[in-house]
Every structure is written in C-alpha cells, then in structure tokens.
Image (tube, rainbow, N blue to C red):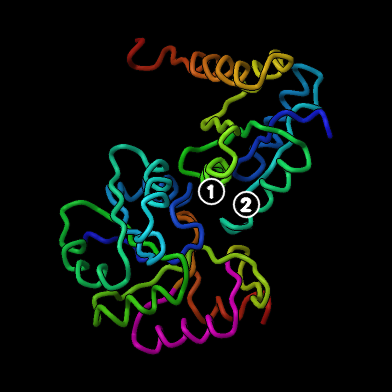
Amino acid sequence: MSNFRAIVAGHGTFAEGMLSAVEQITGRSDLFLGLTNRDLSAQGVEALMRDRLAATGATVIFTDLPAGSCTMAARRIQRELPATAVVTGVNLATLLDFAFHAEAGDAEAVEHAADKGRAALVVTGGKRGA
Amino acid sequence: MALELYRIDDRLIHGQVVVGWGQPLDLRFIVLVDDEVAASDWEQELYRMGVPPDMDVYFEAVDTAASNIEKYQNDERRGLLLTGDIGTMTRLVDATDGAIRHVNVGGIHHRPGRTQRLRYVFLAPDEETQLRELAARGLEVTAQDVPAAKPVPLDELLAGVGA
C-alpha cells in the first residue's frame, strides 16, 4: 500500500495545479493523488476514483465543486464506503493543513483542514472596504 | 420560453450545467428527465446536494415530463431541461408533440461502440440515426458544451473526428 492518504479530484488540471502548489510549499508529493474528470462520463469518473482509492487505500476525497461530477462520484462511492470522507470546495489552505496534520487520524485531520480552508477565504478592499 | 436549453448530457447535473450555463443564463431551475432517477429518492438527494439553494431541481420520468412540459415552459423563471442520453430526449420529443424545437448535445462520453465526433461527444451508429431523425423532424440539433463555445451544427458534428 502507498503513502497516499487522499484523492484530490476536480475539473481540468485543478488537481495537478493544487498538488504542484502543495509540493512547492511542503516538499511532499506522497500524500495526495490527483484525478481529473476531463473527457470522462459520470461512470468513467466514478470508476477511475474507485481504482485510485483501491490502489492507494486512501479514505479521504477532496473535490473542487459541490455540483461537479467528481463530487457526485465521490458521494456514490461514499454510499458503499461510509468511512470515506468527502470534502467539497477544497482550496490550497485545506490541503496544506491536511498535509501538516497527516500523521493524525484522517477524521481529525479532515475536520481541522476544512476549518482552515474556510478561514482562508477572506475578502479585503473592494468597494465595501473603500 | 422559460426553458432556455434542452440538453443531452450523460453527467446530468454537474459543474458545466450548474455553473457554466447556470450563471450566464441566470437559471433558477433544472428539470432532470430520467426514469431511473425519478424512481430513486437516493439519486434525487444526490443531485439536489449539487445545486445551490436558489436553484430548484424537478425530477421527472419521460411520461410525467411530457405532461408537465407546458408548465415548465411557462414558468416565470429561467430553466434548463436535461436528459442523460439521446434515447430519453427522443422519447420526450415524441411525447411532447412539437413543444421542443432545439436540442443541445452537451456531453456524451466514450464507451465501447461509440466513435468520437468532438472532444466531448462520442456517438454510436444508432445514436447518430436518432439525432438525424430529430433534425429531419425540424428540430435544431447542435453540440455545445459551454456557452462560450461555438455551437456545432449536426452536419458538422457527424462529420467530426471519427468520420
């Protein structure tokens, strides 16, 4: 079994870009396995996600968009594997926090990372700040 | 008409539909026509979870969609009707007697027996026949995955990569 702890799934090169940023900041490329839904049917996304989960033993799936086909696939899988955590709307702060708490249990690390991700979304300036 | 788009997309509700079309068209409801989904509470809950709170989703089987299509077309809000395959859209067109005039081929992905026509459209011979039959009945059939893309007329679609 690999060191991978989580799948990062999204549109286009979303996962590739996120994982590149995680590696640049943490030096770790062994925690997350990326997945794109590009050119795949809903069934294709789900099959690929199942393969990646089985190959890695990961129990966490981070996805980019609540309405996205990656999220739909993850929730279908979660129905059969309820211990799998699905986190939607993932951002870089979420993944970085998960990476730094990877040695904690997955459930604890996921909750902590989701909190960090929410807190990282901040608006400054603009008309309201003027 | 309140229904802005009649779309065939095998991913059904997903990012391109909810965000890609939903935001520029200011869509406030989706009519998802699929016999299987209409019979499954769990499937409906899954798709509901994917849409923002200000967007309604109505689940219909082909026969109930046909009965209700006038209501959806006269809705004050803007909506999108969605099927997961060409066969379902064809059945709906058959059952609605001229109520549908345009069909958008939004995403039909690879599976054995299908030939690639566009990056996001793969068609089996019987599916090509069904699309030709829709066009022969006077419907405008175009392929377009997102609003910013150019609509591809059926003739160009069928003359695509695999021809």
Q: How far across and down, in percent of the image, does residue B53 sit?
A: 31, 37
Q: Nearer the viewer, residue B37 or B130?
A: B37
Q: What residue lies at 52% left-to-right and 32% top-to-bottom?
A: A88
- Is B122 magenta? The answer is yes
Q: How far across and down, in percent of the image, does residue B145 sit?
A: 50, 59
Q: What residue lies at 25% left-to-right and 78% top-to-bottom?
A: B96
| CA–CA distance in space, label 2 to label 1 | 7 Å
Q: Quadrant of residue B60?
A: bottom left
In the image, is A51 to the left or to the right of B50? Answer: right
Q: Counting other residues with Cα less than 10 Å from the Cα at mark 2, is it few (<14), some (14-19), or many (20 or more)?
A: many
* Image position of A120 with respect to A30: above or below: above
* Image position of A20 with respect to B150: above or below: above
Q: Tag 1's secondary structure? A: helix
Q: What residue lies at 17% left-to-right and 68% top-to-bottom?
A: B70
Q: What residue lies at 22% left-to-right and 59% top-to-bottom?
A: B2
Residue carrying label 2: A45
Q: Nearer the viewer, residue B78 or A107?
A: A107
- Which residue of the protein is positioned furthest toward the right in this rendering? A1
The numbered dot on residue A69 is: 1
Q: Are marks 2 and 1 on the same chain?
A: yes
Q: How far across and down, in percent of the image, does residue A31 sit?
A: 76, 26
Which amino acid is tagged 1?
A: Ser
Magenta part of the chain: B121-141
